[in-house]
Image (cartoon, helix red, strand yellow):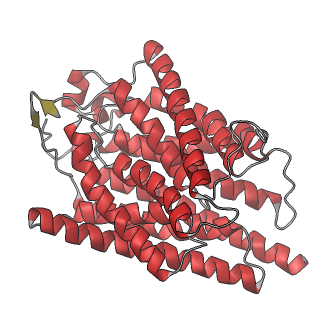
C-alpha cells in the first residue's frame, strides 16, 4: 500500500511536469504564428495565464471542482498539482485564437474567472464531486483527459471571445481574405512538438494510477493510442492538404497532429490501434476542412485553435460513443455531455467577456494593431532589429 502510494505520487508529479511542458509549447507555437511585432505580447499572455490560472485554481477552483473528494491513493498535493496543470490549457487555447488584437489586462482578468469558476464547474460536472447529481446537469460522459472538458471548453470560450472582439485589422477587406503568414516556422514546429510530448502526461496521467500491472498496462495503452492518433492526424492532414493544394503546409500538418491528439483524448484508454488510427486520421482531415470554413464566415483564428480544439474536442467525445459504447458509455451520453458543457461554457464566457469588454475593452485600437502590441502593451519588442511591417 505504501509502495503504491509512493509510485502513484511520483507518477502524478512526473505527469504534471509533462503537462506544464505544454506551457512553452503553446507559447512557442503562438509566437511563431503571429507577426514579429506581436511576439512579446503573446509570450507575456502565456506566462500570465499559467501564473494567474494556477493561483486561481489552487485558492478557489480546486474546491469547486473536487471539494469533498478524499485522495488516499497518492499524496493529495500531487493530485492538486496535476489538476492545476490542466487549468491553464483551456485558456491557452483561447489566447492563441485572439492573438494580435486582444489586450493583456482584460484577457488576464478573464483568465482569473476561468481558472476560479468556469473551468472548475465544468470539471465538477464531469470528473468531480458531482454536486449536480440527479439534475439536468448530471451527465454520464466518458472523457478521460478532456476532449470536451478542456479542449472544447477552451474552444467555446474562444468562439465567444472572437464574436465579441472581432477580427484583426485588415484581415478581411470586402470579400477578400488577407493571408497573414507565420513569422517563424521553426518556433511553430518546436511548439507543436512540445505539445505532443506534453500530451503523454496529459492523457497518461489521467489514468490516475500506475502502481499495479493492470494500471500500468492501461497507462501504456493510453500513451500508445495518444501517440498513434497524433501520427495519424499529421499524416492524414499532410495527404489531404497535398491533394487539395499540391503543397506540403507544415503548419497544417502540425495542426493535423494536434487535432488527432485532441480527438483521442476522450477515450485513449479504451481504443485499439486501428480505432486510434481512424479517430486521429479523421481529426487531421477535420482540421484541414475547418480552417478555411471559419475564414469564410470571418471567424479570425490565427492559430487554428477552433479547428484543432473545438471541432476535434467534439469529434473525439463523439468517437467514444461510436467506437467504445457499452452499458455505461453511450453515444447519447456523450452527446449530452458535449451539449451541456458547450452551452454552459459559451453562454457564461460570452456574458463574462461582454461585461468585461464594456468596462475594459478587449480589442486593441487599430493604431496599436498596426504598430504591434509589443510596443503598446509591453514596451519590449522581441525582434527590435527587424523592420516591422503592418
Res. 265 visible in picture: no
Please say if 231 is above or below 199: below
Label count reads 0
Q: Nearer the viewer, residue 147 or 166?
A: 147
Question: Residue 190, located in which quarter of the rendered image?
Answer: bottom left
Question: Residue 79, located in which quarter of the rendered image?
Answer: bottom right
On the rendered structure, is 214 left or right of 143? right
Please say if 108 is above or below 187: above
**Residue 318 placed where, x, y %?**
50, 57
Q: Nearer the viewer, residue 346 or 339?
A: 339
User: Measuring 65% from the left and 51% from the top, which residue is drawn there?
Assistant: 84
User: Measuring 63% from the left and 45% from the top, which residue is drawn there?
Assistant: 54
Res. 356 visible in picture: yes
Image quarter in which the C terminus is found: top left
Residue lying furthest top: 359
Please say if 359 is above or below 193: above
Please say if 7 is above or below 244: below
Image quarter in which the N terminus is found: bottom right
Residue lying furthest bottom: 213
On the rendered structure, is 246 left or right of 2? left
User: Measuring 58% from the left and 36% from the top, which residue is drawn there?
Assistant: 114
**Residue 290 placed where, x, y %?**
28, 50
User: Measuring 42% from the left and 55% from the top, which residue is drawn there?
Assistant: 312
Q: Nearer the viewer, residue 378 or 302?
A: 302
**Residue 186 placed where, x, y %?**
26, 64
Residue lying furthest right: 1
**Residue 141 placed where, x, y %?**
64, 54
Amino acid at each position: 500500500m505504501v509502495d503504491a502510494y509512493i509510485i502513484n505520487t511520483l507518477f502524478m508529479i512526473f505527469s504534471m511536469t509533462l503537462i506544464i511542458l505544454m506551457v512553452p509549447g503553446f507559447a512557442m507555437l503562438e509566437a511563431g504564428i503571429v507577426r514579429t511585432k506581436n511576439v512579446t505580447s503573446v509570450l507575456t499572455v502565456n506566462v500570465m495565464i499559467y501564473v494567474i490560472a494556477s493561483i486561481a485554481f489552487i485558492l478557489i477552483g480546486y474546491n469547486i471542482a473536487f471539494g469533498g473528494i478524499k485522495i488516499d491513493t497518492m499524496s493529495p498535493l500531487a493530485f492538486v498539482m496535476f489538476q492545476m496543470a490542466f487549468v491553464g490549457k483551456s485558456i491557452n487555447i483561447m489566447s492563441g485564437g485572439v492573438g494580435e488584437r486582444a489586450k493583456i489586462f482584460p484577457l488576464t482578468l478573464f483568465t482569473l474567472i476561468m481558472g476560479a469558476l468556469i473551468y472548475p464547474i465544468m470539471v465538477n460536472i464531469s470528473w468531480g464531486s458531482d454536486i449536480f447529481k440527479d439534475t439536468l446537469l448530471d451527465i454520464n460522459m466518458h472523457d478521460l483527459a478532456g476532449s470536451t472538458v478542456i479542449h472544447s471548453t477552451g474552444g467555446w470560450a474562444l468562439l465567444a471571445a472572437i464574436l465579441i472582439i472581432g477580427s484583426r485589422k485588415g484581415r478581411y477587406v470586402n470579400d477578400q481574405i488577407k493571408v497573414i503568414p507565420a513569422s517563424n516556422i521553426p518556433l511553430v514546429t518546436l511548439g507543436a512538438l512540445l505539445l505532443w510530448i506534453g500530451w503523454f502526461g496529459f492523457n497518461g496521467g489521467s489514468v490516475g494510477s500506475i502502481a499495479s500491472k493492470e494500471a500500468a498496462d492501461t497507462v501504456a495503452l493510453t500513451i500508445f493510442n495518444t501517440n498513434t492518433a497524433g501520427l495519424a492526424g499529421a499524416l492524414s492532414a499532410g495527404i489531404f492538404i497535398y491533394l487539395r493544394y499540391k503543397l506540403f503546409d507544415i503548419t497544417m500538418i502540425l495542426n493535423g497532429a494536434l487535432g488527432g491528439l485532441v480527438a483521442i483524448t476522450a477515450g485513449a484508454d479504451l481504443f485499439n490501434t486501428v480505432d486510434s488510427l481512424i479517430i486521429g486520421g479523421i481529426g487531421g482531415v477535420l482540421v484541414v476542412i475547418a480552417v478555411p470554413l471559419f475564414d469564410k464566415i470571418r471567424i479570425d483564428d490565427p492559430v487554428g485553435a477552433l479547428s484543432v480544439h473545438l471541432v476535434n474536442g467534439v469529434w473525439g467525445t463523439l468517437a467514444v460513443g461510436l467506437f467504445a459504447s457499452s452499458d455505461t458509455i453511450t453515444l447519447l451520453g456523450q452527446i449530452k455531455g458535449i451539449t451541456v458543457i458547450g452551452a454552459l461554457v459559451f453562454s457564461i464566457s460570452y456574458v463574462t467577456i461582454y461585461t468585461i469588454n464594456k468596462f475594459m475593452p478587449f480589442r486593441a485600437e487599430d493604431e496599436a494593431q498596426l504598430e504591434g502590441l509589443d510596443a503598446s502593451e509591453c514596451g519590449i519588442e522581441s525582434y527590435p532589429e527587424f523592420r516591422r511591417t503592418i
